[in-house]
Image: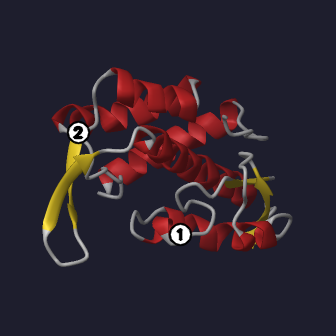
Amino acid sequence: MNFNYRDLDDRTRTLMKEEIDLAARTGQIYYSKRFNSTGTENWVTWLTEAAESHDEHWLAFRIWACGGMKGFEERTTPSGGYTVTHVPDTASQTLADGQFNRFYIAALCRRALDDSTRTLTIYRAKQCAEARPESEFLEGTSIDANSLLMQLRNKQTSFTCALTKPNSGLSVHL
């Protein structure tokens, strides 16, 4: 199931591309450790194309169709050793969902700030079978656009944001 982005219009797409470009120039693009060389080399292009005229579903398909993910990965075992396992089939979709949403939210933060709105409203943009209680608690609440934008512009802190945690299904609207 795709996200329902309420404010994904030409203005938002333009700001998304600007945020992707800024992240690429400042070293804040997240590259999955599950990418192979094809994924790493093409990630920013695919992300930009998705922002320009597609969505997170297209982005996930592009990663998969172009063979951008490794087939296997090493994982540590509880005893401290290592094992080799298949990369989950859902890896490209989870990555695409989170990163497309990250730049969508950053673009809406910019719109809110440009329009002197200053806050955004959190909503469930992707339906799920069982929402996390912390996600349900956030639905309908307002969030400061400036502080959220600063958090999203850093690839490390963007993962600590409840809105962009893998499989949260949350986003924002104006």
Residue 56 sits in which quadrant? top right
As drawn, which residue projects farthest toward the right? 140
Q: Residues within 10 Å of mark 2 (few under 14, many from 20)?
A: some
Frontmost residue, 105 versus 136 = 136
The three-letter code of the residue at mark 1 reads: Met
Q: How many labels were placed on the picture?
A: 2
Query: Which residue does the image show at 52% across and 70% down from the upper left?
Result: 151
Camera-near label (2 vs 1) is: 2
Residue ID for mark 1: 150
Q: Quadrant of the N terminus?
A: top right
Sequence-first disc among 2 and 1: 2
- Is residue 44 found left or right of 112 in the rendered image? left
Residue 13 location (% of width, % of height): 61, 35
- Is residue 75 found left or right of 173 in the rendered image? left
As drawn, which residue projects farthest toward the left? 81
Query: Which residue does the image show at 35% across and 58% down from the upper left?
Result: 28
Q: Report, in whole angstroms, how far the alpha carbon at label 2 lies from the one at label 1.
A: 31 Å
Frontmost residue, 14 versus 161 = 161
Residue 101 location (% of width, % of height): 58, 48
Residue 76 sits in which quadrant? bottom left
Residue 14 location (% of width, % of height): 58, 36
- Up the image or down, 142 lies above or below 31; here it is below
Residue 91 location (% of width, % of height): 41, 44
The three-letter code of the residue at mark 2 reads: Lys
Query: Which residue does the image show at 40% across and 63% down from the upper left?
Result: 155
Residue ID for mark 2: 70
As drawn, which residue projects farthest toward the bottom? 79
Q: Are marks 2 and 1 in contact (CB under 8 Å)?
A: no
Q: Secondary structure at mark 2?
A: loop
Query: Which residue does the image show at 49% across and 48% down from the upper left?
Result: 99
Q: Secondary structure at mark 1?
A: helix
